[in-house]
């Protein structure tokens, strides 16, 4: 007898400002956050994307703008109670199609059981704007080293994975490896979702170091979106989907920094923008930042029609 399949749709909707990047999340009875999601209806939804937009509107009141398909998640284990989709057939294998959406504004969603949530609440080890978080070396690395040491013949290979992912023992920190870092924490039994799914005892680590869990595998989906967005803004001008029609160069830099979780070199960032042709001055200034008047710019959207598809350069500070 064949196993029935249910197709779920999940959305990572991102907004950002100079303080933080935010993901649109739903709130559940136990206080755990989730992503907007629902089951694809072959009769009621003409396409996956239209179905996804319906679920986002119904659960959060948000009207999605820019969206792109992120990934298809089909691992065994998604049938956990937290991942069930309403009228899905009993025992169905759940396949989830994830989407990434970007918006320049955190719209008012107070009428719904939803909230714009700083994604670093779920991934505190990912924000390096004020320097490398001490929790990596003081809390996460010892637990991961112990786990790798207990992997027998695979110990050396697992340690190498940990070193590369978390920038240990002289390895560089690569911001796009968000998913690899989360999956290592899950495999090592350190992520709260791992102890939830296995029924094992939680590790003796500070909860604040492990990040807030999410329902089902939604934190894995969010990690996938973070890594994708961090990489993509370097080769496609997607960051401008997060900006208002007019902005200062400092505002643009701060949004890029909040997404990457890194500080950038101000002068080199501006030089690269000058060379890119992605922005153009409006001949107007603003004092909204509280300092000297700053020039306002806009994204040269016509550059897309001219085949200009590069992203922004990200020279580290």
Image (spheres, helix red, strand yellow):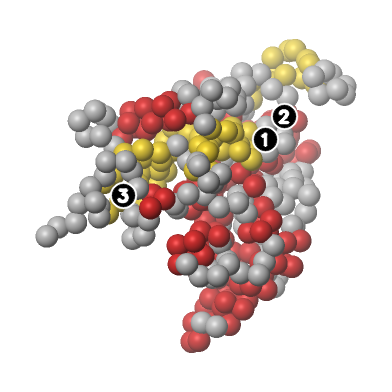
Query: Measuring 41% from the left and 50% from the top, which residue is drawn there?
Result: 82
Local crowd at mark 2 within 10 Å, few (<14), some, or many (≥20)? some
Q: Earlier in the sequence, mark 3 or mark 1?
A: 3
Local crowd at mark 1 within 10 Å, few (<14), some, or many (≥20)? many
- Outermost residue to the right: 292
Q: Position of residue 116 (x, y in %)?
A: 59, 34
> For numbered disc 2, what is the local secondary structure?
helix
Q: In this view, does 44 lie to the left or right of 64?
A: left
Residue 59 drawn above or below residue 293: below
Q: Earlier in the sequence, mark 2 or mark 3?
A: 3
Please say if the residues under marks 2 and 3 sit with CB atoms less than 8 Å apart: no
Res. 255 mark: 1
Q: Which residue has dot 2 on it?
A: 251
In-front residue for pair 91/107: 91
Q: Position of residue 10 (x, y in %)?
A: 41, 40
What's the distance in space between the residues labelled 2 and 3, CA to CA? 39 Å
* Residue 210 position by quadrant: bottom right
């Amino acid at each position: 007898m064949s196993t029935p399949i249910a197709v779920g749709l999940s959305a990572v909707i991102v907004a950002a400002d100079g303080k933080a990047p935010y993901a649109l999340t739903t709130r559940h009875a136990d206080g755990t956050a989730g992503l907007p999601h629902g089951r694809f209806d072959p009769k009621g939804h003409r396409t996956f994307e239209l179905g996804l937009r319906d679920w986002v509107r119904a659960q959060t009141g948000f009207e999605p703008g820019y969206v792109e398909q992120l990934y298809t998640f089909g691992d065994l284990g998604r049938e956990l109670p937290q991942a069930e989709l309403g009228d899905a057939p009993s025992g169905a294998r759940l396949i989830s199609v994830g989407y990434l959406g970007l918006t320049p504004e955190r719209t008012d969603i107070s009428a719904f059981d939803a909230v714009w949530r700083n994604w670093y609440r779920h991934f505190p080890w990912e924000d390096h704007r004020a320097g490398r978080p001490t929790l990596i070396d003081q809390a996460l690395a010892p637990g991961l080293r112990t786990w790798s040491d207990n992997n027998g013949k695979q110990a050396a290979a697992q340690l190498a994975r940990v070193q590369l992912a978390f920038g240990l023992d002289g390895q560089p920190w690569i911001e796009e490896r968000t998913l690899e870092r989360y999956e290592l924490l899950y495999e090592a039994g350190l992520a709260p979702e791992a102890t939830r799914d296995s029924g094992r005892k939680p590790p003796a680590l500070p909860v604040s170091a492990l990040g807030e869990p999410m329902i089902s595998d939604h934190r894995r989906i969010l990690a996938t979106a973070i890594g994708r967005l961090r990489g993509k803004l370097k080769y496609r001008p997607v960051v401008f989907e997060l900006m208002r029609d007019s902005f200062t160069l400092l505002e643009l830099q701060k949004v890029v920094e909040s997404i990457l979780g890194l500080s950038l070199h101000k002068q080199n960032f501006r030089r690269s923008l000058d060379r890119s042709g992605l922005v153009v001055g409006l001949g107007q200034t603003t004092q909204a930042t509280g300092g000297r008047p700053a020039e306002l710019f806009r994204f040269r959207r016509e550059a897309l029609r001219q085949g200009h598809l590069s992203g922004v350069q990200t020279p580290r500070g």
